[in-house]
């Protein structure tokens, strides 16, 4: 796996090139990129874009995975979330020609396209978005084979059904595409039900021998991803060969965001932040996350979900210690190397240095 995280360059207004209806509650939004920003928005498969808009005076941001193959225009898949400020706007209101503020691509849920090998991609629902990007990009190289296990409720809820079918037609010998539906009977019982531990074990036993797989890529709800991780571990798959991305944490609600008053009360730490080659030092309360505490000093800090899921606020601790309370975005190798999610990391030592450019 290649841990590819773009250097933060702020937001740019991009014009919407196309809005494609995928199913009743989902769309794909494609952006035009001016030639002078081509290098800024060059993306690796599986990365994401953070979109920003101001709603009632509030700076709202959401992270959406790119669903396009490498070399194509950046495009994100969006599924409607009930009462979602961003998804409702994107799915129901945004039209070609509109302008949206978009950050540079970020994320490390990305394969090494030059390495080839057999990749198994397991997705549920809108988790197919980065999986489609990864699958299409891998198949465009000659030495990779791909198996996609895709779980949904019914046929009419499947995102990117036509594009997946087109990939299968284009690469029949190198792509195995398996749809599993939980609320619509399939001809074979093996393809009916949820992608839980029993279903995944049955699929592995029948169709996907795990000892012949080089890398597994998991994307979807918390329960599905953790279930798949536990099963693969029990089957002897090394953790370094299993990569994850969560679209939401369905049974672990995010901690409420704490708003910190300008005056620092109680225990504090001297925190130095490095972003875009500029260093800022400040005293931050230890009861607040690094991100929340530092935003009044550095409003340009990158963030999206603030729930420990998207990885947009990823940075490296180069001095001192922090307490990272939730992590659903970073892999063990990243944490071992000193990377943290600043939205979930509270200062612990007297001095802390956090490098967003690392």
Image (cartoon, grey):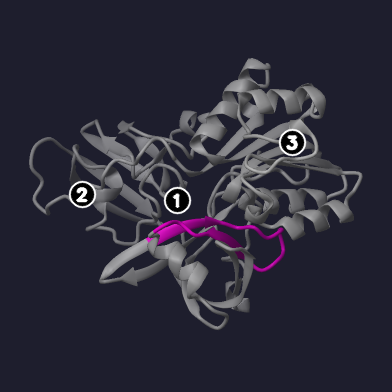
- Residue sitting at 31 percent across and 33 percent down? 322
Which residue, given by chain and number where applicable, does mark 3 sit on?
191
Q: Which residues are magenta?
A: 61-82
- Tag 2 near tag 1, CB within 8 Å: no
- Residue sitting at 30 percent across and 48 percent down? 291
Q: Of circles 1 and 3, which is in front? A: 3
Q: Residues within 10 Å of mark 3 (few under 14, many from 20)?
A: many
Front-lying residue, 267 or 245:
245
Q: Residues within 10 Å of mark 1 (few under 14, many from 20)?
A: many
Q: Quadrant of the N terminus?
A: top right
Label 2, label 3: how far apart the Cα atoms are: 55 Å
Q: Which mark is residue 121?
A: none
- Residue sitting at 12 percent across and 52 percent down? 261
Which residue, given by chain and number where applicable, does mark 2 sit on?
282
Which residue, given by chain and number where applicable, does mark 1 sit on?
312
Front-lying residue, 290 or 224:
224
Which residue is situated farthest in the bottom direction here? Answer: 97
- Counting from the top left corner in percent of width and height, residue 230 is at 57, 22
Q: Is residue 140 visible?
A: no
Q: Is residue 216 left or right of residue 33?
A: right
- In the rendered image, the vertical position of residue 324 relative to residue 284, given as above or below: above
Is tag 2's residue or tag 3's residue first in the polypeptide sequence?
3
Q: Is residue 69 magenta?
A: yes
Which residue is situated farthest in the right direction here? Answer: 173
- In the rendered image, the vertical position of residue 214 relative to residue 157, given as above or below: above
Q: Secondary structure at mark 3?
A: helix
Q: Is residue 284 left or right of residue 188?
A: left
- In the rendered image, the vertical position of residue 300 relative to residue 53, given as above or below: above
């Amino acid at each position: 796996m290649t841990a590819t995280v773009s250097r933060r360059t702020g937001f740019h207004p991009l014009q919407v090139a196309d809005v494609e209806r995928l199913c009743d509650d989902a769309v794909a939004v494609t952006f035009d990129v001016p030639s002078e920003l081509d290098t800024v928005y060059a993306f690796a498969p599986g990365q994401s874009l953070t979109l920003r808009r101001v709603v009632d005076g509030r700076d709202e941001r959401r992270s959406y995975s790119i669903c396009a193959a490498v070399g194509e225009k950046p495009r994100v898949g969006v599924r409607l979330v009930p009462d979602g400020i961003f998804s409702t706007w994107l799915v129901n209101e945004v039209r070609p020609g509109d302008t949206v503020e978009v950050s540079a691509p970020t994320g490390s849920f990305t394969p090494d396209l030059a390495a080839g090998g057999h990749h198994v991609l397991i997705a549920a629902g809108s988790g197919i978005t980065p999986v489609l990007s990864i699958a299409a990009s891998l198949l465009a190289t000659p030495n990779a084979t791909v198996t996609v296990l895709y779980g949904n409720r019914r046929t009419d809820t499947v995102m990117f059904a036509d594009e997946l079918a087109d990939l299968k037609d284009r690469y029949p010998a190198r792509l195995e595409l398996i749809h599993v539906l939980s609320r619509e009977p399939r001809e074979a019982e093996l393809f009916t039900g949820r992608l839980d531990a029993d279903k995944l074990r049955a699929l592995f036993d029948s169709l996907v021998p795990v000892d012949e797989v080089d890398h597994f890529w998991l994307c979807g709800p918390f329960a599905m991803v953790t279930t798949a991780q536990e099963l693969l571990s029990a089957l002897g798959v090394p953790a370094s060969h299993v990569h994850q991305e969560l679209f939401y944490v369905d049974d672990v609600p995010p901690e409420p965001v704490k708003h910190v008053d300008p005056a620092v009360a109680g225990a504090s730490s001297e925190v130095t932040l490095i972003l875009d080659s500029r260093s800022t030092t400040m005293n931050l309360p230890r009861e607040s996350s690094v991100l929340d505490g530092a935003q009044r000093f550095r409003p340009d800090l990158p963030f999206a979900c603030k729930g420990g899921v998207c990885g947009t606020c990823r940075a490296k601790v180069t001095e001192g210690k922090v307490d990272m309370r939730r992590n659903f975005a970073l892999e063990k190798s990243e944490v071992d190397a000193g990377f943290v999610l600043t939205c979930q990391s509270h200062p612990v030592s007297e001095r802390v240095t956090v490098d967003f450019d690392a």
